């Protein structure tokens, strides 16, 4: 479970993600879960899901709600689908 991941593990994961993004140079990085945002974009004043103004390692950032059925902030498939559709429009799929 994500709750079992320590802060140190999250920071290490962000460092690895940064190296990967710099290597492959994607135009957009999608984060799965808003709890990652403070680690990936520390100091960001853009809470919640959606496109962010701040870039990460040169890539646009789009935050998606966690698809877990336990996600009460965005319940069910219908609660999450608009964010996935917005991502598709953002990356021009």
Image (cartoon, helix red, strand yellow):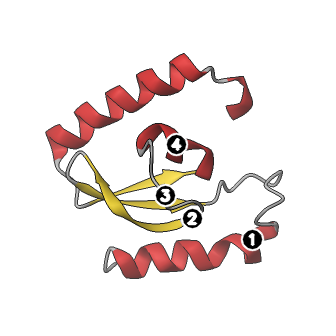
Regarding residue 33, the answer to whether it shows in the image is: no
Q: Quadrant of the N terminus?
A: top right
Q: Residue drawn 61% across and 79% down? A: 82
Closest to the camera, between mark 1 and mark 3, is: 3
Q: Residue at 57% x, 73% y: name it.
A: 83
The answer to which quarter of the image holds residue 88 is bottom left
Task: Using the numbered discs, state the Cα–Cα distance from disc 1 to disc 2 in whole angstroms.
Answer: 15 Å
Q: Decide if residue 37 is on the left or right side of residue 27.
A: right
Rendered image: mark on residue 77: 1
In percent of the image, x 23 and y 61: which residue is there? 27
Q: Earlier in the sequence, mark 1 or mark 2?
A: 2
Residue 75 percent across, percent down from the top left:
82, 66
The quadrant in which the C terminus is found is: bottom left
Residue to which mark 2 is pinned: 49
Rounded to the nearest angstrom, the CA distance separating label 3 from label 4 is: 10 Å
Asked if residue 25 is positioned above or below residue 19 in the image, the reply reads below
Q: Are marks 1 and 2 in contact (CB under 8 Å)?
A: no
The label on residue 60 is none
Task: Identify the residue shown where x is 37% and y is 77%.
Answer: 90
Task: Count neighbours of disc 2 (C-alpha within 10 A) and say few if under 14, some if 14 to 19, many if 20 or more.
Answer: some
Q: Is residue 52 visible?
A: yes
User: Relative to residue 19, is residue 53 depicted above or below?
Assistant: below
Badge 1 marks a residue whose secondary structure is: helix
Residue under label 4? 38
Specify which label sits upstream in the sequence, 1 or 3.
Answer: 3
User: Where residue 34 appears, x then y in whole percent?
Assistant: 60, 52
Q: CA gap, disc 1 to disc 3?
A: 27 Å
Local crowd at mark 1 within 10 Å, few (<14), some, or many (≥20)? few
Q: Which residue is mark 3?
A: 45
- Mark 3 crowd level (few <14, some 14–19, many ≥20, 10 Å Cα): few
Q: Earlier in the sequence, mark 3 or mark 4?
A: 4
């Amino acid at each position: 479970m994500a709750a079992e991941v320590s802060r140190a593990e999250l920071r290490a994961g962000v460092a690895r993600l940064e190296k990967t993004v710099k290597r492959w140079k994607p135009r957009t990085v999608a984060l799965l879960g808003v709890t990652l945002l403070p680690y990936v974009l520390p100091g960001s004043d853009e809470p919640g899901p959606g496109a962010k103004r701040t870039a990460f390692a040169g890539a646009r950032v789009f935050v998606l709600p966690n698809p877990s059925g336990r996600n009460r902030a965005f319940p069910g498939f219908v609660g999450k689908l608009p964010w996935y559709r917005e991502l598709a429009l953002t990356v021009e799929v």
